[in-house]
Amino acid sequence: MANYILKRTLYLLAVLLVLSFLVFAIYNMLPIDKAADMAMQEIAANKNLIYAERYLYWQRRLGLDGNLFTRYLRWLGLKSFYDGTFNGLLQGNLGKSVVYGKPVAQVIKEPLQNTVFLNAFAALAALGITIPLGIFCARKKGSKRDFAVQVGTIVGYSMPVFITAILFIWLFAVKLGIFPVSGMNSVGKDYTGVRAFLDKLYHFALPLIVMTFCSLGGMTRYVRAAMLDALRLDCIRTARAKGLREGRVVRSHAWRNALIPIVALVIGWLLGIFSGSIMIENIFGINGIGKVYFDALTANDNEVVLAMQMFYVLLALVGNLLVDLAYGLVDPRIRVGK
């Protein structure tokens, strides 16, 4: 297992380097020259300055001089700038946001916390509902209750997220007045400590309900299908022939086999909490990472976009490694080290 993890880690780093270079090259193709913009701003303030000198100064200051590969190494932090300093990703520098005027790390810190806070609750709630519900439907296949759940999941799975969000806002916020329409905290209130946390939970309740509801359809049907396949296995028929109770057959035998196809979906879903939900965050006015990513794309804030894109690439590669390791833990027939 240790050798496998080491090999996969080296493979992950190699793929990450290749993908990072491709992403960096794509964004460098955009017709945006920050050195020229800075030089023009200085000349607009002081007409005595020479454009060529200021342009060269800002190129060296921002690390934009040299060819594409040289700039890429500076961005990674493997090559020094003109003044001999190293200031790239390896040194913790994700760049500076043009829109916000501050380092990218500061821009995404709070939105990332909000996204993880919201999506972690939604993921746990959805898993707590879909897994027992999927197992129940598989055990009661063909019954009226199974039919009702299947119809409900098809309806929920087919409805767009924004339609569901609008309907829930109309029902719970406008008609019943239980939850606020949007926002992250009460207007005009300056809560601190536990009171601030509870106020945040109150504002996150409706988007949390919407996200959980939208996740039920697909996940429930997936768990149900995996359990149906597991219940048809020969080992399940043998366990039943031995006189084991149905509950033990499901818990000890069927569920273990059903986990094999489910584990990849669950891990991918849990890792997806870092990506945020652009639609939900925009509808409910939540300062999340999905909204920041969308705003950066529309405003051509390439430093933020580039940092976020690399974060998603790393997240996907780590997710694939975790899925492979989870397969080895769930299914004893799989030995990832061999």
Image (spheres, rainbow, N blue to C red):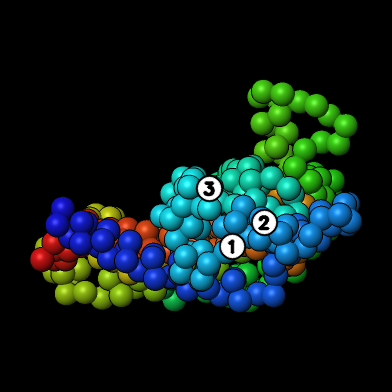
Quarter of the picture holding the N terminus: bottom left
Indicate whether 130 appears above or below 173.
below
User: In the displayed structure, does residue 106 sit left or right of residue 270?
Assistant: right
The residue wearing badge 3 is: 83
The three-letter amino acid code for the residue at tag 3 is: Asp
Under circle 2, the secondary element is helix
The answer for how far apart the CA atoms under marks 1 and 3 are is: 13 Å
Quarter of the picture holding the C terminus: bottom left
The three-letter amino acid code for the residue at tag 1 is: Leu
Pinpoint residue 213: horizontal percent, then vertical percent.
62, 60
The residue wearing badge 2 is: 58
User: What's the residue at 21%, 74% (across, down)?
Assistant: 233
In the rendered picture of this protein, how many numbered marks are placed on residues? 3
User: In the displayed structure, does residue 123 sit left or right of residue 167?
Assistant: left
Q: Residue 332: tell me if it is visible.
A: no
* Label 2 or label 1, whichever comes before in sequence order: 2
* Label 3 or label 2, whichever comes before in sequence order: 2
User: What's the residue at 20%, 68% (across, down)?
Assistant: 236
Residues at circles 1 and 3 in contact by the CB criterion of under 8 Å: no
Residues at circles 2 and 1 in contact by the CB criterion of under 8 Å: yes
Q: Which mark is residue 64?
A: 1
User: What's the residue at 69%, 45% (across, down)?
Assistant: 102
Q: Residues within 10 Å of mark 2 (few under 14, many from 20)?
A: some
Under circle 1, the secondary element is loop
Q: Nearer the viewer, residue 252 or 216?
A: 216
The three-letter amino acid code for the residue at tag 2 is: Trp
Indicate whether 30 appears above or below 174.
below
Under circle 3, the secondary element is loop
* Label 1 or label 3, whichever comes before in sequence order: 1
